[in-house]
Structures are given as C-alpha cells and as structure tokens.
Amino acid sequence: MTTIKNILVADDEESMRWVLSKALRKKGFNVELARDGDEALRMIKESSYDLALLDIKMPGVSGLELLDRIKDESGDLFVVIMTAEASMKNAVEAMKRGAYDYFTKPFDLGVIDALVEKVSRAREMTSQVSLLKEELKDRYQLEKTIIGNSPVMRDIYKTIGKVAPSDVTVLVQGESGTGKELIARAIHYNSKRLGKPFIPLNCAAIPKELLESELFGFEKGAFTGASERKLGKFEQANGGTIFLDEIGDMPFDLQAKILRVLQEREITRTGGNQSIPVDVRIVAATNQDLEDSVRKKQFREDLYYRLNVIPIHLVPLRDRAEDVPLLVDYFLAKICGELEVPVKRCSPDAMKLLTSYNWPGNIRELENTIKRAVILSPDPQLVAADFPGLRSRQSGDGKGEELSLEGIVDLKLRGSFTNMERMESGDVYAMVLEQVERPLIRFVLEKTRGNQVKAADILGINRNTLRKKITELGIELRKE
C-alpha cells in the first residue's frame, strides 16, 4: 500500500499541469494544482501534502526558492524538481537544497510512476525509522518506569522476557491503576515487532455504537458522516501490536468479531465486504474476573481461552508494599522534574505512612498523592502531615501508622496549611484529638472483643456516639 495520498503540482505551463494531474489522478492520487510559486507556497501553508512536483522556473517564487521555504517550514514534505534545462548546475543546486529527486522535461509517464513508487518507499522507510527512534526512546523511559523489586515483580519481569519474543496472545489482569498498559508496552518493545506500531484502545472509553468502527475502520458512505474511508486500529497496528484495554467491557456481539480476527487474521471494515489480512499481535487487559463473566454469560468462553494463552496477573500495590519506597522516590524525582523544582524527599514518618496505606487506587493513586504533596508543601522534606488525606483512609487493621504529633505541630508552626488542608484536616486540636481517638477506641474494642455496649460504658460515652465515631474514624470491627 502506497504511503502517498496528496500530491501538489506547481508549474506555470497549463499543459504540463493537465498531463500530470490526469496521470496521477488515474492512479488514485489526490492532486492539487498551482500556477506559480506564490500560489504553491500559499497552498502548502494551508494544506498537507505528501509529495510536491515543482517546476524550477515559475513567475514570482521560483522552484528552488520554494524548495528552501518548504525545507524551513515543512521538512517532511518530499520535493521533486522539474526543469526543461538539463544542466548540471540545476541538478546540483536542486539536490544541494534538499530535493528528493530531479528530472527533465519532456518525460515519459512511466518515469512519473517509477518516481512516485520510489518516493512512497522512501516515505515508508523514513516513517519506520522515526517510529523506531520514538519507540527506542519510549522503551528507555519504560525501563525506568516499571518500578519494583518485590518477588512478584521479579516474576513478572521473567514472564515478559519469556513471552515477548513470540507472537503469543497475552492477557494482563489486575486492578485499575496497577500499570497494565506499561506491561503491554514492555512486551511490545522487547519483541521482534519493535519499530512497528503499538496501538492502544480502551474498550470501556468508547461508546458501544462507535467501538466497531474504531477497531475495524469503515468505508466511505458506510453511515451518515462517513465522507471518506477510515482505517481502524487493527489496520493501523498492522505489523505491530494492538493493546485492547478493559476488554471485559467489550459488547458481547463484538467479541465474536475479535475472535474471528484471532482465528482468521483478517478484518472487514464497517460498510465493506472485502476481507483484509492483518498481521497483529494482541495483548488484552482487564480489571474484571473474566472467568466469572464467562459463567454469567457476559463474556464469550471461546474468546476467553483464545486471549488467556499467557496470563499475567498484576498484584495490587497493597500486596507489594516493599516496592512503595522505590515508587515514591521515582515519582518525587519525576514530578519535581516536571514542575522544575528541586527534588524533595520523604521523612521517615511520611514514608511509614505511605508504606502502610492500602492504596485502593494503586500506583495511579500513589502518583497523584505525591504530586499533590509536592505542590502544596513549600519545604524540601515531606512529612506525614503533608498527606492529610491518608489519615481517614487507613486500612483499619491496626497496622497503619498514625500521624505523629511532632509532624502535625511542625506543619502548623511553619504555616504550611493551605485552605484546602484546613477544610480536610481542621486545626491542630481536632487533628490531634482524632489521632488519640482512633487508637483508644480500637484498643477498647479489642479488649471487649467488639462488644460495643461494654466499650461505650468503659469510654463513658453513649453507644450511638460510639457507632458514629467508628464510622467517622474508619475503624474496622473485628469479627470473632
């Protein structure tokens, strides 16, 4: 498939414009014509072209002058110079200024066909080199982004290394925010498909009625508003990898078409009847229990087994707490770099708090929490009180660290409470009172084996007040 679609022909001879436009349009190209250099320059600024055929001598701006302007303003446009004077000076000058090629008039139309094919191959090669450079850059960044040295993460690294070289289908499972797309990219960047596209698609983010055309594309006139053919994600990913995120949310009827792609390695555009072969590796991901969805008839069993050839399960952050300090240090460096501020550090009490929290939003929540603290705190060291939102969301299992009295008072003394923090945490008296109440009530409930009547009597408060406190402080009642 040619990579050239739009061609500009600029020549002051009407007969030459007519001949070239007729020949090129017959080949299926979209051709636009300019009578001189000034018109051509205006058109290049207003529209996008893949190839420009420029006469070397035109009224106003000459072909060589136009070539200079194009290289300054539209460096990715391939330019071919045409001239009736076959002089060495013209040829050397054109190539020196950055023309892709040069030919003389009159010419055989076969020369044009060969030239367009040559430019098409060069554009494809340039595109692949550019993509490869970008992917190598992304791969380098990715190697610094997947953080973790816990046993479960080391096992995942081993699995990636084993499955990446093959084209086997992979299903990545894990809660939201655990980094499923990072794993999919790691598989792609370590595969033989490096240098080919990696195309992600979130199946849950696209309305049901649009998802099919996003995946498979559509033909011109397939539905109202389809003014031209559009390639879907599978064709865009041809030769590379498509990442189907949240595939558990895919409509049941569309699952059959995904199964067909896996089996037949071909797709059909919406509104079309031609089968189009695709060479694509599929990596899917979900935060759902697909086995349960299969039992409930919400997910096709045959598709599940096709996807689940190699399962990779990402554990939630609360199950690899030893990785939290590494992630915290990474996010501090990353966020401070983005904000262009000196890198901040976490105090021991802050790191204890972050490590003990159960992170229901996983890595994504941790990153957002760190970013908020970096923005709000003026000091180079973050203390536990810089994370007030974590106090009321502790797991309630008695293992979480309470905010230290020293940390709270220190934060107040340095005048670092913002209005937002006052709304969330109140004054020092209220904060300290809460820190005392939680462990006290937990202790009494443990001593009374969860008997709220006895606990309220010991505490000297009404039973209803105790219930309210249990709810407000997020205290989990132990079940005997």
Image (cartoon, grey):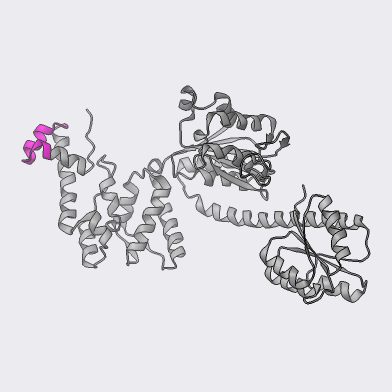
User: Quick check: is 186 in the magenta stretch?
Assistant: no
Asked if residue 373 is positioned above or below residue 446 in the image, the reply reads below
> Horizontally, is 392 left or right of 256 in the view?
left
The quadrant holding residue 183 is: top right
Q: What x and y, as percent, mark residue 201?
A: 56, 43
- Magenta-drawn segment: 450-465
Instruction: Judge whether 196 appears above or below 335 on screen.
Output: above
Residue 339 coordinates in the image, percent (x, y):
43, 65
Residue 394 x/y as whole percent: 28, 45
Q: Nearer the viewer, residue 61 or 375?
A: 61
Decide which of 450, 1 is in the foreground and name it.
1
144 horizontally vs 82: left or right: left
423 vs 31, left or right, is: left
| Residue drawn 36% across the image and 45% down it | 359
Q: Residue at x 44, y 42 (%)?
A: 176
Any magenta on residue 460? Answer: yes
